[in-house]
Image (spheres, helix red, strand yellow):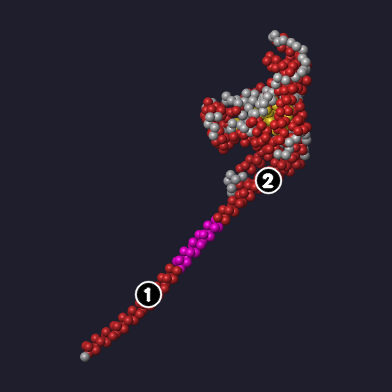
Amino acid sequence: MENDLVDDYRKKTVTIQSELQKVQNLFPGTFDNQNKDIGKYFDFVDDPDCQVAIIGAIKAGKSTLMNAILGEDIASTDVTPETAALTIFRHSSKENYVEVHFYTAREWGELWASADKKKDSLFRNKYDELRAEKVKKKYIKHSPIKKILTSIKSLREIVKKYSSSQSPCHFFVKKLVIGLSKWGSESLPLPAHLTFVDTPGLYDVIPYRANITREYIDRANAVVVCVNSSKMTDAEYKTIDETLKSIGYDKGKVVILGTQIDQLNKPNEGWDKQKEHWHKQLETLYGDKELMNTNIIGVSAYIFNMVQKLDTGKQVDGNDIDDIFRFAKKSGIKIQAFRIFGKATNTEAKKLIVKKKDVIMRKTNIGNFLRVLREGPLKEPDMVIEEDIRSWFNDITTGLTETAEDQKGKVENKLKLLREDQKKKQDAINKKSMEIKEIRDARKNIQQQFDTMQAKINTEITGMKKKLNLELKNRIGG
């Protein structure tokens, strides 16, 4: 990917941000979402990647899948509905790290309002049980915490601290970002540009978190829906339906994994039968039989993970070894028979499994799943990222334009109402002025009439006086 493209769009965005700062003080709160989007966009162009969103119900095998892909047990496999935190896994060019991001006061208020509608939910019950309210002030609005870690063990401890269902602080964690210098497993290394986002799911018990999942689906370059291979529930069907509708025309971005095929009596035949049934269920949603055949894959992340642990000398207990042998047998893989009678036999069993590791891991289909991603929605990563840079920028400018137009309409409407109000007031003033003028004219007319009348009276009085004086003079004189 060309750096000139990144620099060009960064400069354009800086210009937009500068112009936005000039006007946003006039309209407090109006452009908050746009400012947030611009901040996310800067983060993306600083370190662009291809994002794969992983969704699915609790216990659908999302965390086990991530651990198999990463080659380390980092994602918690005992996540419960009240602890479904958003977790981002990405490559680190230097050391391993964990970033913990917390909710702002406004975000927590929105989350709590959505949780408050279900006061009998597991979330609320666990929140009260752990007395999380006592530590809320410590974590709400807390600045992000970043820990540089030298070992996977210490990284796992930090992840557990902030995501464990027994830790009160996990309620206030908005997301975890986990950076790994060793990206992928020994057998299936991952390209550095690939990022996995483990989401709470579209039907999380907290609607606010479900909306976060929708946002990531809209932005993701590929979406992986994990469904237990034994049965597709109504909720899982709805999840697939909503995901395909959100993706739009490019349905190749959606990969459906039938997880835990090792639990089927016959992984090969059982999955083929289940896949055929799913094809019938999803045919109208996908609309492409060939695409369905490629993008619906049965996997066993658990078996893949256990085998690669054995291959790299990590500890695996006897029950896991038994599960691997059972899976191999059900999958038609011939391994020398043995019975487990202690440590020595376990050691021999491990050797037998490692000897057949390639064929066993191939049967788990984890490699096939990653191949479908690489050859499908993420086939040309540079072009995918470049398109993201352009389309995200266009989304920001479109959002700003729509918000500005909406605000312009509101201002113009207010001005119209103000002008109408001013006209009404001016009309009232004019009416009052006319009334005052009429009163003044009436008063003037009355005054004139009074003055005329007064003059007449004075004239008559003067005449009467003269007449009276004349009569008196005549009488006195006579």
Rendered residue at 66%/41% (across/down): 38
Q: Is residue 71 visible?
A: no
| Residue 424 painted magenta | yes
Rendered residue at 54%/34% (across/down): 117
| Residue 158, percent from left and from top | 63, 25
Q: Looking at the image, is 377 positioned above or below residue 335?
A: below
380 or 54, which is in the foreground? 54
| Residue 39 painted magenta | no
Tag 2: amino acid:
Thr
Label 1's element?
Answer: helix
Q: Is residue 213 visible?
A: yes
Residue, disc 1: 450
- Which quarter of the picture shows residue 107? top right
Q: Which part of the image, by quadrant, shows the N terminus?
A: top right
Rendered residue at 52%/29% (across/down): 134
- Disc count in the image? 2
First in sequence: mark 1 vs mark 2: 2
Magenta region, residue range: 418-437
| Residue 406, percent from left and from top | 62, 49
Categorize mark 1 by other alpha carbons within 10 Å: few (<14), some (14-19), many (20+).
Answer: few
Residue 397: assigned label = 2
Query: Label 2 near label 1: C-beta < 8 Å?
Result: no
Q: Main secondary structure of the magenta part?
A: helix
Tag 1: amino acid:
Phe
Q: Looking at the image, is 363 positioned above or below residue 462?
A: above
